[in-house]
Structure formats: C-alpha cells, structure tokens
Amino acid sequence: MSNPHNQVDLEAIKTEKAYTPKEWPLESIKAAGMGAFSGFCVSSFLTHIQSHNAGAAGVFTRTGYLMPYLAALGGIYAATEGIASNVREEDDFANAAVAGCVTGVLAGARNKSVPLMTGGCLVLGVSMGAYKYFGGFGTNLRGMSKEEVLKYRREHLRLE
C-alpha cells in the first residue's frame, strides 16, 4: 500500500526552471569576433618576438593565419554549445563538454592527425565541461545572495 502523502510531485520538479532557447547564431558571431581579436593579439605578439624583415605587415603576412583560425574555433564552440543546449533543452555542463570536444577535433584536424583530434577532443571536452560544471571563474555566482551561493555549491559540488 502506497501512501499518497509520501509521493514526490515530479511535474513540480520538472517545471521548476523553464528552459529558454539560446540565440546561438548571435553568440557564435560574438565568439568569432572575440576569437579574431585574440588571433590578432597573438599574431602581434609572435610578430614582435620573431626576427624578420616584414615590418608591421608581418602581423598579417607571417602569423595572420591565427586570426581566422581562432575566429573559426570560437564561433564553432559557441554554435555547438548553443545547438546542443537547444536540442537537449538543458543548459548544463554537458553542452560545454560537447562543444569543447567538437572544437578540439577541429583544432586537431588542422594538422591532419587523428591522435591530435582525439587528444583535442578529450582535453577541451573535459576541461570545458569541468569549467562549466564548477561554475567557471565565479561568473555564475555573481549577483546571488550568500544563501543562493551556498545552495548552488551544495547542489553542484556535493560539499555537504
């Protein structure tokens, strides 16, 4: 005999947080822009420390391949994370792990090496999934009260 008072209301748990779809095309464009800017900064640094006679144009001629490469990786990561989130209708660490894995495979594909593709998938997938799982650098915790932060940590980190 089951007691109806001891039953858990599963519908109340499922509808606790409604999922809002991500605008992944916009996020992908923003991430590609940040990747291109990062590529410009890295290219500038590499051009500065190398010895050559290309002058300032070396940012684009010698190491300029980094700008579209990092732009593509950033855009693909953001697009994959958004698409995975919309398909699964959940915003959790698994989306970041999938996006990291896809980005790692594409980073390894540049060198046409299956071991690098596999390693890139493992390293980026695990690291990005763990980053998202543990709350990043505290960005998820900003704006929360101390009670909400403690609840978040109890739920996600299983500290207590």
Image: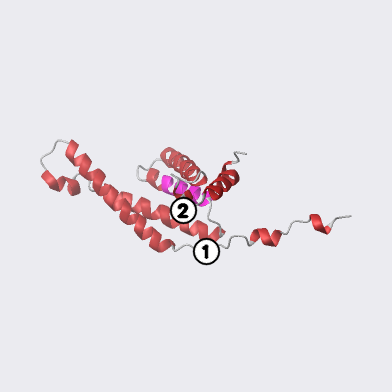
Front-most of residues 39 and 65? 39
Which three-letter amino acid code belongs to the residue tagged 2?
Gly
Going from N to C along the chain, the mark reached first, 2 or 1, is: 1
Q: Which coloring applies here?
A: secondary structure
**Does 34 appear above or below 112?**
below
Q: Tag 2: Cα neighbours inside 10 Å, few (<14), some, or many (≥20)?
A: few
At 47% across and 50% down in the image, what residue appears?
Answer: 140
Question: Which segment did they paint magenta?
Answer: 93-105
Locate residue 59, reporting x and y percent: 18, 46
Front-most of residues 61 and 27? 27
Residue sitting at the far right: 1
**Does residue 31 appear left or right of residue 152 in this picture?**
left
At 47% across and 54% down in the image, what residue appears?
Answer: 81
Residue 95 counted in the magenta span: yes
Residue picked out by circle 1: 20
Can I make out residue 65 in this image?
no
Front-most of residues 2 and 5? 5
